[in-house]
Image (cartoon, helix red, strand yellow):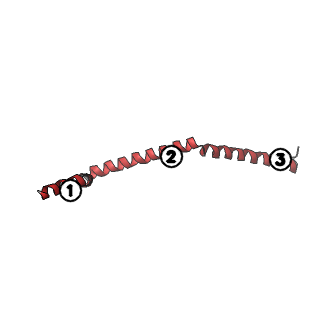
Amino acid sequence: MTDTPLALAEAEALAARARLAATLETLQSRLDPKAMAKKATQDVVDASEKAARVGAEAVKDNPGKAAGVAAAIGLFLVRKPLLSMLRRRRDR
């Protein structure tokens, strides 16, 4: 039995509809807000873990620099009470 042009066109249309339906299902699953939130959360967790690993390696490789940075951050955080204490001492 030879396929007619109409039968071939109908088969192609049916295959195209099936491909389109599969594409739509894929898009719907990717655009699901819960799925997007889950993926974003996982991406953030992965990036945080990598940053922590890199940071830990940097501290191991350069402990002096890490101590200096920690000291600078500590001084920055206590700058107001420290300056206040020095001013009171100077005013006496």
Q: What residue is rendered at 41% in x and 47% in y?
A: 48
Q: Which residue is mark 3?
A: 10
Q: Nearer the viewer, residue 46 or 75?
A: 75
User: Which label sits in the foreground, 1 or 3?
Assistant: 1
**Quarter of the image containing the C terminus?**
bottom left
- The answer to which image quadrant residue 45 occupies is top left
- Amino acid type, label 1: Leu
- Amino acid type, label 2: Ala
Mark sitting earlier along the chain (1/2): 2
Q: Which residue is mark 2?
A: 40
Image coordinates for residue 53, horizontal then vertical, percent: 36, 47
| Marks 3/2: CA–CA distance | 42 Å
Q: What residue is rendered at 64% in x and 46% in y?
A: 27
Side of 29 where 77 appears, left or right: left
Mark sitting earlier along the chain (3/2): 3
Side of 15 where 76 appears, left or right: left
SS label for mark 2: helix
Q: Are marks 1 and 2 in contact (CB under 8 Å)?
A: no
Q: What residue is rendered at 87% in x and 51% in y?
A: 5
Q: Residues within 10 Å of mark 1 (few under 14, many from 20)?
A: few
Task: Evaluate whether residue 71 shows in this view.
Answer: no
Q: Nearer the viewer, residue 51 or 80?
A: 80
| Marks 1/2: CA–CA distance | 43 Å
What number is the disc on residue 83? 1
Mark sitting earlier along the chain (1/3): 3
**Quarter of the image containing the N terminus?**
top right
